Amino acid sequence: MSDGTELGRFLRARRGQIRPQDVGLPAGTGIRRTPGLRREELATLAGVSVDYYTRLERGRETRPSPAVVAALGEVLRLSADALHRLHELVALAAGQAPTPSPGPARAVREPVRALLETLRPSPAYVVSRTNDLLAANRPGLRLHSGITDWPRERRNITRYMFLHPMGRRLYRDWEEMAAHSVAHLRAIAGADPDMPELAQLVGELVVKSSEFARLWERYEVRARGGGQKHFQHPEVGSMSLTFEVMAIFRTDGQRLVVYQAPTGTADHDAMLLLDMASPEEAALVEGAEQ
């Protein structure tokens, strides 16, 4: 992915998502054979020649100026995260590859594990930079119903969303959550496009999930932060929880994810139920966390 072709794929994908009327052009009559903007339309709006833009999209031009990159980002209506990704791809196309990061750290420090317990009954867990589930408190693990059916090395939140039988049923707004999850993977790909664990995960999901493959080709980019998720949990029913995502210092991309709900609400009661378990269930969860 470290040459001009990845930059070209990004530009083509994002060009195909912009309608003429989005940028003040007439929609015209008849059927457009090109989805989104035509090359000549984008080139004109960005203030470059059609020949130059065509070479850029085909990987034969790899050093666009900052002014050209800014103009392309404006015409393509890129978010801050997507514009950052465009700058990364330009640097990669020019041969300015980022320094590869070390292999992912899967060990979770004991103070962080202790923190997970203090957060109960709020579901909380730690994920790697590619969303591997590394540690969780009881409600955090039970939130993803059935994930303990998989061996520890396969417990990944994105894999669960697309491949686990419960993945689609758990999220009431699955399409939106799935798109956000894929956009997050695109965002981290910019920092280290050749990371083996990302290539392995994406390769598996592209082959096994046509929906993931379609979303991956859209080149949407979004860094994950806080927000709200709506669940239809098989054990505790419907609940809507806010969540925050926090980076853990001195780790290679580990993040702490914590869910909350106001005290006294039905959503908070559902969280309490997630934290309750029979002795047999508790033993299963505790063993899965190790």
Image (cartoon, rainbow, N blue to C red):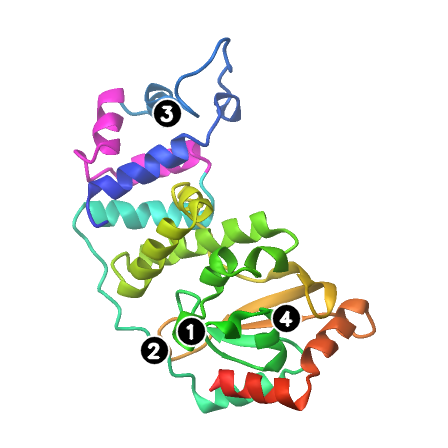
Vertical relation: 209 (above or below) 132 = above
Residues at marks 4 and 3, CA–CA distance in whole angstroms: 42 Å
Amino acid beneath label 3: Leu
Vertical relation: 228 (above or below) 36 = below
Give how far across and how far down residue 241 sits, in percent: 68, 65
Q: Which of marks 4 and 3 is nearer the N terminus?
A: 3
Residues at marks 1 and 2, CA–CA distance in whole angstroms: 8 Å
* The quadrant where residue 36 appears: top left
Amino acid beneath label 1: Gln
Do residues under tags 1 and 3 come within 8 Å of each other at their CB atoms? Answer: no
Amino acid beneath label 2: Ala
Do residues under tags 4 and 1 come within 8 Å of each other at their CB atoms? Answer: no
Q: Name the residue under label 4.
A: 259
| 27 or 133, nearer to the observer | 133
Residues at marks 4 and 1, CA–CA distance in whole angstroms: 17 Å
Q: Which mark is residue 181?
A: none
Left/right of residue 39 with respect to residue 100 in the rendered view: right
Amino acid beneath label 4: Tyr
Which residue is depicted at the point 27% across and 73% down? Answer: 103
Q: Earlier in the sequence, mark 2 or mark 3?
A: 3
Q: Name the residue under label 3.
A: 42
Which residue is depicted at the point 34% across and 33% down? Answer: 12
